[in-house]
Image (cartoon, coloured by chain):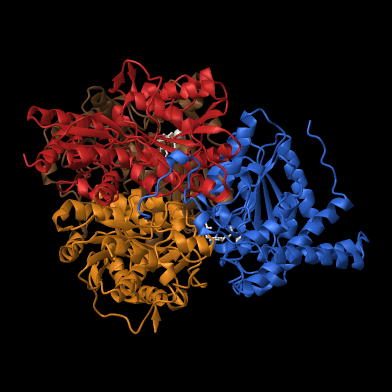
Chain colours: A brown, B blue, C orange, D red
Amino acid sequence: MAKPVAPVSTSDYIKAYRVMLVSRVLEDKLAALYRAGMIKGGVFLGKGQEALSVSVGIQLRRGDLFAPLIRDQAGRLAFGDTVLDTLRTYLGSALGSMRGRDGNIHRGRPRDGYYAMISHLGAMVPAVAGGLLARRLRGESGIVGATCLGDGGTSTGAFHEGLNAAAVDKLPLLVVVANNRYAYSTPNSRQYACADLLDKAAGYGVTGHRADGTDLADCLRTLRTAIHQAREGGGPQLVVADLLRLVGHGEHDDASYVEESLKKSRLGADCLQLAESHLLDQKWASADDLRSWRNEAEREVNAAADRVRREPIPDPAEEDWTALSTATMRENPGTP
Amino acid sequence: MAKPVAPVSTSDYIKAYRVMLVSRVLEDKLAALYRAGMIKGGVFLGKGQEALSVSVGIQLRRGDLFAPLIRDQAGRLAFGDTVLDTLRTYLGSALGSMRGRDGNIHRGRPRDGYYAMISHLGAMVPAVAGGLLARRLRGESGIVGATCLGDGGTSTGAFHEGLNAAAVDKLPLLVVVANNRYAYSTPNSRQYACADLLDKAAGYGVTGHRADGTDLADCLRTLRTAIHQAREGGGPQLVVADLLRLVGHGEHDDASYVEESLKKSRLGADCLQLAESHLLDQKWASADDLRSWRNEAEREVNAAADRVRREPIPDPAEEDWTALSTATMRENPGTP
Amino acid sequence: MITYLEAIRLAQQKALATDPRVFLYGQDIGTFGGAFKATKNLSTEFPGRVLDSPLSEDAIVGIAIGAAIEGARPIVEMQFADFSTCGLNQIVNHAATLFYRTGTPCPIVVRLPSGGTSGGGPFHSQSLEAVYSHWPGLVVLTPATVEDAYSMLLESVALDDPVVFCEHKFLYYHLKAERLPDEALPIGKARIARPGRDASVVTHGAMLHESLAAAELLAQDGFELEVVDLRSVKPLDTDTVLASVARTGRLLCVSEEWPWGGVAAEVIARVSTEGFGLLDAAPVRINAKDTPVPYHPELWAVHRPTASTIAAAARQLLHI
Amino acid sequence: MITYLEAIRLAQQKALATDPRVFLYGQDIGTFGGAFKATKNLSTEFPGRVLDSPLSEDAIVGIAIGAAIEGARPIVEMQFADFSTCGLNQIVNHAATLFYRTGTPCPIVVRLPSGGTSGGGPFHSQSLEAVYSHWPGLVVLTPATVEDAYSMLLESVALDDPVVFCEHKFLYYHLKAERLPDEALPIGKARIARPGRDASVVTHGAMLHESLAAAELLAQDGFELEVVDLRSVKPLDTDTVLASVARTGRLLCVSEEWPWGGVAAEVIARVSTEGFGLLDAAPVRINAKDTPVPYHPELWAVHRPTASTIAAAARQLLHI
Ligand SMILES: Cc1ncc(C[n+]2csc(CCOP(=O)(O)OP(=O)(O)O)c2C)c(N)n1
Ligand SMILES: Cc1ncc(C[n+]2csc(CCOP(=O)(O)OP(=O)(O)O)c2C)c(N)n1
Ligand SMILES: [Mg+2]
Ligand SMILES: [Mg+2]
């Protein structure tokens, strides 16, 4: 009785594109701030992966769960994160959601369904599954939880255990694998030996979907289908998308290990540029539209950056230095 | 250029059967000793799984690696473990290979390629892979390493990471899964959601093989093929066998959770009895042969048990209470 | 008579009955009732709320964390404390950091059947309370009595923070109480299990009972050991320990876990730094020996502290 | 000038060159040379012996263990110490128990890029030496100098026991030496890094340098701190520490890891129990605060001990 999946409309496409654009402009800004030495810690960007990421975040609903990973700036914005909070986190503003305690890609607001990843890859898979289990136990249905990871992340025990457990309980979990051919410098050939990561789906008894990660329309369609199937009771969905990251692992990395032939292949295409061509080809937008959208994005990003730079930084004296929420459980020996 | 696999001969079959028989007789003895309160710790038996287990252990060669698991009494004996050392370990003789420091299924002699499992399921998969890697780095080829685990063990991160890493390096690793339908009390339906555990093979890019765990000839054939393929450079082989354990998880467990219909199904057949019928049907052995082989096995087991009961137990005063091999690294604070 | 194990079962039953947010997840805890039967009948009594998990400790804890974020109160069982190392990453890096990082509490309870029993061996005997106490962000409990097993487990479920609940397998069957308490000392408070004037024995878990037995032995010689049951090793009730040492002037710490950085080391560090002037003599610690826990009962009996080795240490401390 | 990081690279190079049993396994350590470049060029220099692993810490350690059983001498790199929690089970339950259980040694070296750096945050800053020291069966090293980074890593490879090698990221680039040593103090021996008469500061890793800076500060006031660099936290050279305290009568323990059961607690426990009479005053410890390591540099600077907080503690200890 699965309801049919609504097709991706022009306005869906444009909406998604515009989030990708903001994400790209924001990440370019982060890279520039990094080069200027203004970022606290590292910068890890998702350039080239926006089409896939936005397709996840934008098609989840309020009340769904989302645990984005490293390369999900676009998906984060689509799911409700803001340019402002992104900049606050990277620039170390005291007003950021992590209050300086954690940074960059580790931000989130778990109570809003926007989980804050820990660095240990794979760890968010069971966490989202658990969130979904709790919702089910509470009698809720029709919600979906999604998390993303890379080709490298599929090698972790956490991915395996989490996806398997979710499958046993037929939880509405979406695991989106961005196969960008490298885990840091490690090529697929040293990461796995299966012909295709999608071959893993059958081993978990979950539905597999493939997306062309450079093609926004395909990503939107594929994710829409997968999310729909999860929502309708189809159990976990494994989406594998093919693409490249068009930046280094972090901004400290020049990614010189990426093979030239790969860069030149279809995978090396920039999903944002392809989307722009598509918009123009289809006459869904004019060159003027694109320019003005970009200007708008730049204004927003620059304004936020300017604002954040004037914000206070965390004050150690105001910290209560406790990791526990219960006041009576606190202690701090050895810190006179 | 793979050499053809030699067929399983009558004498192979009989040799394997006789190890199964010793294993069965030995395990019956262990169960009796357990009931008599003479065992130190628990007793975990492999009744019903002897055909599969022996087919692994007996077809490995000297120089190969073998990390047996819980239900591998038969495979252990076939690989070179002895009735005597088994009894020494269970009865806590000081002369056992583990010297009272570890017990039951955790015994082994790693330096002889007979690895000593840790309890944490899945953990032996990467260990055997590592042994194989070291041998390869030393320039050795043509060796094989095998490890066994249960349906439950496939849910561990260690199994996943280990098999995947072995596949990446195309190591001659055999992972033999005894799908006995339960992990302790947990039925397959709460353990995995794939249609068949063999569906996992493609996800790792390894060759899959199925064996009927109740049928010695099929087990011998299947394992022979798998071992051969690994030895010839075919990379990791995943063997999945269907069977039931015909005892509790341990001797403390009455296995009342095992479904009647399963017990009555083909899976519930006793591989030892089936092998005996086969021997008689094929006229490879007479009823007298079977009786005298059993008597021989019983004599060996009883003699060993009697001997072990007169052996010294570990003397705490003779222990050096150190976990390190290097004398200068030892210390023992807090133990005046 | 109610056993320590039954108290744990009853606490889970009460938690399930009184708090709809509570559910149980772990290996074999459903129809089977758990490897130790700590969840016996609960799956029948609370259908759909006592779930068998796959053999996946990392996923078990990870799932509990996600559930807690969504407002549930999961209690997860590790089949043995020793296997929690396979779920340790989620415990120490996810559950324990969540509140600090995001302000979202993570109210999970991870039950660890802990400690040595005869024939348990290296992988079914571990006492990991010191390990979990080292990382910030966890409450680590070591109930030593039937009453505490019950009340502290209930309090754990009510707590907004992640709890590592180290229940001791050695106490499961033979420790018994007439009835369960209505009121209890809160988590975080130590208890004077036996008052005495000559030396303070600070201990927890199964070692409480060895220490009490040692106190009996010394009482026969006319010496009175004060036995302090820590109950909770993190937070650790330094005040009660210091007050005891202030009375006795002597400190003997007894712990079943390994010595290096164990509970005994931490207690001695606190008393030495915060109550140096109270000490009339060098503090003493007794731990298990620094090797894996041996399997053979004869070796095991010597590996861990016992009433007689504790008594011997106390005699030395008292120069008897 | 040779950096601490380069010393680690050179030690691995020498181990590969001189011992055919040695190989390297870990994430991105091949052509890329590792996240920190500790294996730069080694895969080219030693083809087939420096292998990129999948993103699988548990398998990485498990593979090293199997290789060690077969006579190899694997050195494995965790990309950050923090991720070793995903391989911890193999380290503490397999590598660390193998010799005790079976008599077969397990000569693996697990390199942990450890400790805090500015902006590292909760998951790229941890100091886990206390955790690994608690379990029996491991040698846990914390080199604090370029010379020790080199000689102790070489000695680790030669050792028949599993070594957790906690190299400190904060020292990677800015700590430099003229040349590498030919001879060195053996593993297991602490070193008097600065002699002094007024108090003993016992420390390790990056905190050695904060402690030495604090000693400079106190020297300006005319007080001489003796700074003891533990080098190896397990085994821990209690004799050298006791000898120092015997000279100074005062003990200040400084550790970057968390307080509960940390190196500082263990040192204080040893000195209090074995050298109580040597202490003229209560020992003092300073650790990182008991929260995850904060990401923001301003918070991080306060979270960990620094020269100025160490100096302040020393002043208090000396009643200045
Ligand atoms: C368990 C674990 N080990 C190591 C790391 C260090 N690390 C961070 S990102 C990364 C590579 C991830 O590759 P992939 O999963 O393919 O994602 P991508 O970066 O390509 O998006 C590594 C090794 C980690 N975060 N977690
Ligand atoms: C990591 C881990 N978790 C839990 C256990 C406890 N345990 C021992 S055997 C077992 C069931 C194993 O089931 P399976 O893998 O199917 O093997 P079988 O017993 O059926 O042969 C469990 C849960 C363990 N040994 N290791
Ligand atoms: Mg990748
Ligand atoms: Mg099974």
Q: Position of residue D188 (x, y in %)?
A: 38, 36
Q: Residue at x 82, y 38 (%)?
A: B4
From the viewer's side, name the closer residue of A324 and C212: C212
Q: Quadrant of residue B141?
A: top right
Q: Position of residue A162 (x, y in %)?
A: 46, 52
Q: How many marks?
A: 0
- Whether D116 is drawn above or below D93: the answer is above
From the viewer's side, name the closer residue of B249 and B235: B249
Q: Quadrant of residue D294?
A: top left
What is the quadrant of the N terminus of chain D in the image? top left
**Quadrant location of ligand 1?**
top left
From the viewer's side, name the closer residue of D127 and B313: B313
Q: Residue at x 25, y 54 (%)?
A: C268
Q: Position of residue A157 (x, y in %)?
A: 49, 47
Left or right: A182 as drawn, with respect to C278: right
Left or right: B217 as drawn, with respect to B179: right
What is the quadrant of the C terminus of chain D in the image? top left
From the viewer's side, name the closer residue of C289 and D125: C289
Left or right: A48 as drawn, with respect to B89: left
Residue C265 can be seen in this image? yes
Residue A153 can be seen in this image? no
